[in-house]
Each structure stands twice: as structure tokens, then as C-alpha cells.
Image (spheres, rainbow, N blue to C red):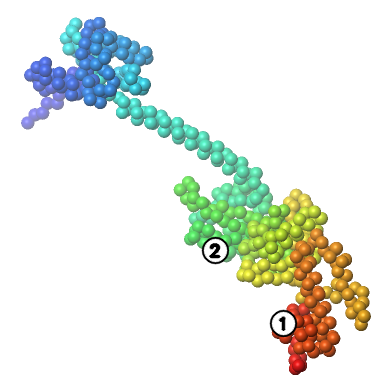
């Protein structure tokens, strides 16, 4: 069997089979086929006037029947008129013209886009114009353009945000590292981190973040990264820098971007140590940590920067990280006004001595303390607080002068004058009341020759109440035998 390959027909030449079928079609059937194959068909006479039109249902609102009797070129927009002239000029019996998009003014206010091709069935006869509705394609094109413009605007915003981030990252005085959470490789390091670590930023990028610290801190840093990958958050740790550059507090937070997880590492050096230098940091830190009295350094807004173990014990805290960043007011003072009096005096005079107050522990414990504080100016101003437990008994130095029998009397007026402005009035009243109660108990025991039952009756107290006050003020020997009435 032999197969003869026929050349593929061009768009201007319909296949032979189609020509054979078309030969059996009468005018009515041909018209139906034209109407079914086109959204809009027009019959144009030799003068370019529209004589007839077939319109699809989707174009009913465009008032196309109103075009009848008008020149086709008058129904289109100005920029489309050359295309209409070309469609009329190129229409011949030999074949259909190429498709051209033409825009018509629409009653809706939005131009009606139609894609036309024309053919003249017989020489000198009318021209048949076939049109396809391009509104859906035009709407897609508009949406594409709007989407492209929106993407350009978003890109501009992202670029501006990245520029701001880069600038803030570079000028920030806080050392920051951006680390890949999976590999622990440093992706970025700002100049402050480079200065703290003592090496150029280019040499830091690509290094394992753990290798930037002393080997003694390796285990703590690895545990911090493990917690960060497992739960998305990790607590602060203390890490030692190599070559004797001191210690820093390392905090890490997780964020996602560019298809992966990264960690933002902040390295916070002690402000006192940073001013003193690397050579003095270790001994200074060791002395402050070993002090038996509480020692706290805060910023001017009273947020804790560092605190030693004695303060943590008074505040009932386990680690320094629980206190860092929180205001000292959270633990200091019986009430807010008492702490405010201390801070106001510190601002006015630059120093406070022997301020009597309390430390409120995290678990409800209350400890009477005395506070000495100083305000330090400089490039990084801060406040220093030395906190020690208050004496259990009234100091002997608080008495001056003699009563009959050799007993001292208090300098109440002078003492109160010295303490006004440094101690709240509530504290002054409480201490004065305690002093008077102690003197009364001692006098009653002296008059009754240490007969506690008679002393309690003289003071209007119960035996148990007298014993409680004696224990409170450290009066008498409570371990000795108790006499009967």
C-alpha cells in the first residue's frame, strides 16, 4: 500500500476535503457556520459601511446593532483606524487577512477589544469581517500588568527594608552574629562583634560559632544550639572569649528565612568590664562575685545589667539571667513609693548611704537591708547598688547622753534630721516605734528585777506577747528558767 504525503495547507488555502464540503453548502448554512464560529461578524459594503451584523450573546450590552449604517472606521478608537483601513484594503477572494486587534468605544467606559480578520468572497462584492471577543484576554493582560506592578512595589519595599536592616546591623553597638541553625556556621557578623572577638568580620564568616569561644564554653554553647533547634528557644548562657578577652552573655533566638532556619546571637559584655579592659575584667568580676554583700549594676532606667551571687540569694533567684533586663524595683522596697524615694535621692545627690528598706524575694521572703548606691556618669552611664542585710539589733552608736542610772538616751531629732530624704517617713516611724518598745521592755524588766510576769502586766502585754517582743529586740535571756508569779 502506497501513501502519498500531501503538502500541509497554508492558512490561506483550506484543505481539499473542506473545499469539497463547502461546495455543498447553501447561503443559509454558510451564514450559520459563520455566526457560530465568530463572536461578532460584520458585512461591509464597498464604501466601508456596516450593512449587517451578527452578535453573540456575550456582546448584547455593547449596542452593536447601533453600528448599522455607519462607517466601520467611525466605530473604533483613533489608534485603531489604520488597522480597519488595512483590513478593508487587504480583503480579497484568495484568502483571509491576518488577524488584527481593534478597540471600540464602549458604553461601560472601558474599550471593547475585538480581534478581526476579513475576506471578500467575490471580487467587487461585500466584505465579510469575523471578530473574536478579546475582553477575557485583555482582563488577564491587565491583571498581569497589575501583578507585575505590585511585585515591583513589593520588591522596592523589600529592598528598602533590607537596606535599613543592613545599615542598622552595621552601625549597631551591640555585637550580633547571624548563624545557620543547622550547621552553626556564621553567615554574618557586624563590626561590633568583630571588635569584641578581635578579628576581622571576613574571618568570622564561615566559622563554626562554637569555635569563636574558649574551649571551656563549648559544652554550654552546644547545649544552647541543641535547645534552640529542638524547641525554638534557648536560655542565656555565660561564655568565655579566647585569648583572655573576658566573658560575655550569649543569647540566641531562632528565625526562618530564605528556606532555612537561622539563629540571631547577641553577645553582651559586662559594661564595667568593657570600660576597664580585658586585663582588669577577670579580677574585677571575681571580686564582685565573691562579695558577701549584694552588688547590682543597672542602667539609668534601673534595668539590671549584672548582679552577684549575694544579691541573687537575697532575691531568691537561681541564675543571673533571671534578673538581667528586669528593673530593680521588682525586688527592692516594701512599696513603690519607698523605692522611688531611693532613686529620687540618688538622682538629686549622686549617692545614697544606709538607706533602710527590704528585699522582696521571688518566693515571698522579705529581708531587711541597707542600701548604698552611686550614680556613675560617662560614655555608658550606670547605677551601682551595694545591698547588705540590716543589723538585727539597734546599733549602740544610735545612743548618746545619759539617763539616771547610766543608760543612754537616743538623739531622736538629730537622727531623723539626718535620715529625712534618704529614708521614707514610714520607715522612720517604724524604727522609732521599735526603739520605744525596746526601751519600755528594758525599763519594765529592770523595775521588776527581771520578773517577766510582772513586767508583762506592767506593760499591758500577755506573757507570750512579751516573749515575742523580747525575741524580736534581743532583750533578756530567753533560754534561762522562767520564774512563776
Give me the residue at 20% from left, 18% from top: 54
First in sequence: mark 1 or mark 2? 2
Image x and y of residue 7, in percent: 17, 23
Image x and y of residue 334, in percent: 69, 65
Q: Which mark is residue 378?
A: none
Residue 433 in sight = yes
Q: How many marks?
A: 2
Residue, disc 1: 465
Where, by quadrant of the figure, is residue 352 drawn?
bottom right
**Which quadrant is home to the N terminus?**
top left
Give 3 or 368, whichever is nearer the viewer: 368
The vertical placement of 229 against 122, above or below, is below
Residue 371 in sight = no
Q: Is residue 126 left or right of residue 73?
A: left
Where, by quadrant of the figure, is residue 370 drawn?
bottom right
Q: Secondary structure at mark 2?
A: helix
Give 185 or 53, whichever is nearer the viewer: 53
Give me the residue at 76% from left, 62% from top: 424
**Which quadrant is home to the C terminus?**
bottom right
Where, by quadrant of the figure, is residue 67 drawn?
top left
Give 454 or 258, whichever is nearer the viewer: 454
The vertical placement of 363 against 473, above or below, is above
Q: Secondary structure at mark 1?
A: helix
Give 184 or 395, whichever is nearer the viewer: 395
Give me the residue at 32% from left, 17% from top: 104
Of circles 1 and 2, which is in front?
1
- Judge the density around disc 2: few (<14), some (14-19), many (≥20) Cα neighbours within 10 Å: few
User: Mark 1 and mark 2: span between their CA atoms?
Assistant: 56 Å
Q: Is residue 243 left or right of residue 421?
A: left
- Judge the density around disc 1: few (<14), some (14-19), many (≥20) Cα neighbours within 10 Å: few
Q: Which mark is residue 223?
A: 2
Image x and y of residue 292, in percent: 74, 71
Amino acid at each position: 500500500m502506497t501513501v502519498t504525503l500531501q503538502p500541509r495547507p497554508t492558512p490561506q488555502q483550506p484543505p481539499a476535503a473542506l473545499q469539497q464540503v463547502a461546495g455543498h453548502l447553501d447561503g443559509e448554512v454558510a451564514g450559520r457556520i459563520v455566526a457560530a464560529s465568530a463572536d461578532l461578524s460584520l458585512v461591509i459594503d464597498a464604501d466601508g459601511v456596516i450593512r449587517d451584523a451578527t452578535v453573540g450573546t456575550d456582546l448584547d450590552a455593547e449596542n452593536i446593532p447601533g453600528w448599522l449604517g455607519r462607517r466601520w472606521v467611525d466605530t473604533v478608537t483613533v489608534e485603531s483606524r489604520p488597522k480597519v483601513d488595512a483590513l478593508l484594503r487587504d480583503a480579497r477572494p484568495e484568502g483571509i487577512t491576518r488577524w488584527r486587534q481593534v478597540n471600540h468605544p464602549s458604553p461601560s467606559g472601558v474599550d471593547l477589544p475585538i480581534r478581526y480578520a476579513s475576506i471578500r468572497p467575490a471580487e467587487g462584492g461585500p466584505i465579510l469581517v469575523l471578530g473574536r471577543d478579546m475582553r477575557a484576554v485583555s482582563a488577564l493582560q491587565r491583571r498581569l500588568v497589575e501583578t507585575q506592578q505590585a511585585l515591583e512595589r513589593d520588591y522596592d519595599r523589600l529592598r528598602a527594608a533590607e537596606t535599613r536592616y543592613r545599615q542598622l546591623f552595621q552601625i549597631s553597638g551591640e555585637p550580633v552574629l547571624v548563624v545557620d541553625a543547622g550547621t552553626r556556621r556564621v553567615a554574618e557578623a557586624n563590626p561590633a562583634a568583630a571588635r569584641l572577638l578581635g578579628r576581622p568580620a571576613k574571618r568570622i564568616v564561615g566559622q563554626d560559632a562554637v569555635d569563636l569561644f574558649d574551649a571551656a564554653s563549648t559544652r554550654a554553647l552546644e547545649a544552647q544550639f541543641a535547645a534552640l533547634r529542638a524547641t525554638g528557644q534557648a536560655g542565656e548562657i555565660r561564655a568565655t572569649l579566647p585569648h583572655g578577652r573576658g566573658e560575655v552573655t550569649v543569647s540566641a533566638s531562632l528565625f526562618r528565612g530564605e528556606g532555612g532556619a537561622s539563629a540571631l546571637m547577641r553577645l553582651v559584655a559586662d559594661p564595667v568590664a568593657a570600660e576597664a579592659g580585658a586585663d582588669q575584667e577577670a579580677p574585677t568580676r571575681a571580686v564582685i562575685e565573691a562579695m558577701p554583700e549584694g552588688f547590682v549594676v543597672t542602667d539609668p532606667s534601673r534595668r539590671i545589667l549584672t548582679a552577684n551571687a549575694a544579691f541573687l540569694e537575697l532575691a531568691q533567684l537561681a541564675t543571673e539571667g533571671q534578673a538581667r533586663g528586669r528593673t530593680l524595683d521588682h525586688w527592692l522596697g516594701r512599696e513603690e513609693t519607698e523605692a522611688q524615694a531611693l532613686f529620687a535621692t540618688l538622682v538629686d545627690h549622686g549617692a545614697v548611704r544606709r538607706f533602710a528598706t527590704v528585699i522582696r524575694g521571688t518566693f515571698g521572703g522579705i529581708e531587711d537591708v541597707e542600701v548604698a548606691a552611686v550614680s556613675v556618669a560617662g560614655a555608658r552611664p550606670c547605677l551601682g547598688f551595694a545591698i547588705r542585710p540590716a543589723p538585727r539589733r539597734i546599733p549602740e552608736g544610735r545612743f548618746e547622753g545619759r539617763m539616771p542610772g547610766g543608760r543612754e538616751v537616743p538623739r531622736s531629732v538629730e537622727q531623723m534630721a539626718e535620715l529625712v530624704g534618704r529614708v521614707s517617713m514610714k520607715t522612720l516611724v517604724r524604727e522609732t516605734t521599735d526603739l520605744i518598745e525596746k526601751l519600755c521592755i528594758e525599763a519594765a524588766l529592770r523595775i521588776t528585777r527581771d520578773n517577766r510576769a510582772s513586767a508583762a502586766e506592767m506593760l499591758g502585754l500577755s506573757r507570750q506577747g512579751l516573749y515575742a517582743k523580747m525575741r524580736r529586740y534581743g532583750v533578756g535571756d530567753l533560754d534561762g528558767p522562767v520564774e512563776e508569779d
